Each structure stands twice: as C-alpha cells, then as structure tokens.
Amino acid sequence: MPAAADHPAVTTRSSSAAATSLPAGYRMLSEPPTNPEYVHLRTSSGLSPRTPEQAVGALSASWAWTVVRAPDGALAAMGRVIGDGTWYFHLADIATAPAHQRQGLGRAVMEDLIARIDAAAPPHPYITLLADPPGQRLYRSLGFVDSDPSLGMRLPR
C-alpha cells in the first residue's frame, strides 16, 4: 500500500471546511470505514448488499475516502472516489445511516470529496457517479447533470 502522503484514502484528517456544517459532535475523517462497517452501512442505507470479501478491494484500492463519525464514534456516513488521480474520478458508496439522515451528512461527504478532487486534479477533471433515485436531488443541487447523450451501462455478472 502506498504511503499515506501518496494515497488520500489512508490519510486521517479532519476536514475543517466541511466540519463546520456537521452537527455538534460529528467528525469528518479521510479514512475508510472498517470492513464490517462498510458492509453494514451499504445494506442499512439501501445500497445493494456486498460481502466482506467484496469490500476488501473497495476499502484498500479507492483513491479517496471520507467518513463521518457520530459523537459515539459510530459510522454515520461514508463516500469514496475511484479514479486515476488526474482526470477521471467516480464517486461511489455515498451512504448515510438511517438514524443520521436529514442532517446534511451526505452533502458534507460529497462536498469534501469534490474539494479533494479539485485540489488534486489538473483543470477540468471528469467527475461521474451513478445516481440512484434517493440521491438524485442532492447530486443535482451539487451541480451534477445527466450525461446525455451518454448512457451508463453495466455488464451483469
């Protein structure tokens, strides 16, 4: 694994810009959740379930992670970026635990990840995501638009 200075996903820091918009006692960190936390939050937030084996690559090979911890230390929200670090960045696993929704945590995670992309990438990075219906209003409010005429596709397995 690369050194923390070379790999934003393993850098632990508080994000002062986004932390000001978090509820009292919540902390934003640039680190991945644990494997059990990742698997649980995907399922509890309504994302498609993943196994602990599937989580391994997501947790170790993402370009960047942002998590929000509740006052008791529990994982409240998460998101990550997959990408090459120069022009292509894909936001994934944006999720907030049901007990912590409607407090701006998803927005804070998104804003932090986008700010990190903007700080690291040359001008005009290509930032994508797949927008499930529950998140579409948030994503549009952050400036995301449909990728017409392109269409997201997948290869079922």
Image (cartoon, rainbow, N blue to C red):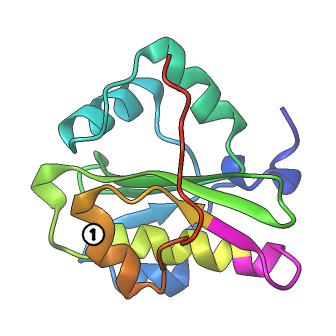
- Residue at the farthest front position: 149
Local SS, label 1: loop
How crowded pointer 1 is (Cα within 10 Å; few <14, some 14-19, many 20+) is rated as few
For the N terminus, give its image quadrant: top right
Question: Looking at the picture, how far across and down is residue 114, in whole percent?
Answer: 60, 75
Q: Where residue 42 sits in the image (x, y, percent)?
A: 32, 37
- Residue 56 as seen in the image, left or right of residue 68: right
Q: Closest to the observer: 22 or 139? A: 139
Magenta residues (range): 118-127
Residue 29 is left or right of residue 82, and the answer is left
Quarter of the image holding residue 122? Answer: bottom right
Relative to 60, is 125 above or below? below
Residue at 48% x, 86% y is 143
As drawn, is 26 to the left or to the right of 88? left
Q: Who is closer to the viewer here, 43 or 129?
A: 129
Q: Is residue 78 left or right of residue 1?
A: left
Identify the amino acid type marked 1: Gly
Q: Nearer the viewer, residue 94 or 34?
A: 94
In the image, what residue occupies the spot 63% across and 79% down? Answer: 115
**Residue 112 drawn above or below residue 100:** below
Residue 20: percent from left, percent from top:
40, 87
Which of the 4 quarters of the picture holds residue 41? Answer: top left
* 130 drawn magenta: no
Label total for image: 1
Residue with the mark numbered 1: 25
* 130, above or below 51, in the image: below
